[in-house]
Image (spheres, rainbow, N blue to C red):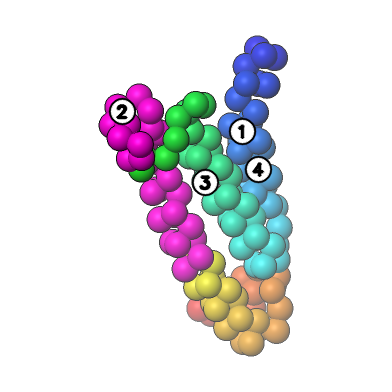
Amino acid sequence: MGTNLFINYGEAVAMILFGIGFGNLLLQPNLIKKIIGLNIMDTAIYLFLAEKGYIRGRVAPIIADGVQSMEAYINPIPSGLVLTGIVVSVSVSALMLALTIRLYRRYHTLDLDEISKRLRKEGL
């Protein structure tokens, strides 16, 4: 058990980061801290995908020196998924921050519990 943890330390770090982000997302009432927690979770998933896509001793799938054997290259799909996920998460983060700014301008607080109380008072 202990040796597997040292061999798969990248996956273990990704799981710990995901747990930290998920706990932050659930336990923090501040909207900015929730956005940070979601970004930590995104980063953990990208780390996990990068770890799973890496094979020791292999290189990126760019044919060089005439080597065309599949055993010489890593699978490019996890890397493509990570790049696509980063682009999507930046867009989602920008949208969440824009909505947070709008909420702050209306309610003058970033506390989600306080915003919920004010919404109930308004009858929305």
Q: Position of residue 120 (x, y in %)?
A: 59, 75
Q: Which residue is mark 3?
A: 46
Q: Is residue 10 above or below residue 83?
A: above
Q: Earlier in the sequence, mark 1 or mark 2?
A: 1
Asked whether, in this view, residue 69 is left or right of residue 99, the answer is: left
Name the residue tied to disc 4. 17
Q: Amino acid at mark 2?
A: Met
74 to the left or right of 24: left
Would you call the spot at circle 2 few (<14 residues within 10 Å), some (14-19), or many (20 or more)? Answer: few
Q: Looking at the image, can residue 32 be seen?
A: yes
Q: Are marks 1 and 3 in contact (CB under 8 Å)?
A: no
* Residue sitting at x 65%, y 81%: 104
Judging from the image, what secondary structure is the residue with disc 1 in? Answer: helix
Relative to 39, say whether 99 is above or below: below
Q: Which residue is mark 2?
A: 70
Q: Distance of mark 3 from mark 2, alpha carbons?
A: 24 Å
- Front position among marks 3 and 2: 2
Q: Main secondary structure of the magenta part?
A: helix
Marks 4 and 1 close (CB-CB < 8 Å):
no
Observer-side mark, 3 or 4, equals: 3
Q: Amino acid at mark 1?
A: Gly
Which residue is drawn at the image coordinates 58% and 56% (left, top)?
A: 38
Q: CA distance from mark 1 to mark 3?
A: 11 Å
Q: Is residue 49 left or right of residue 118?
A: left
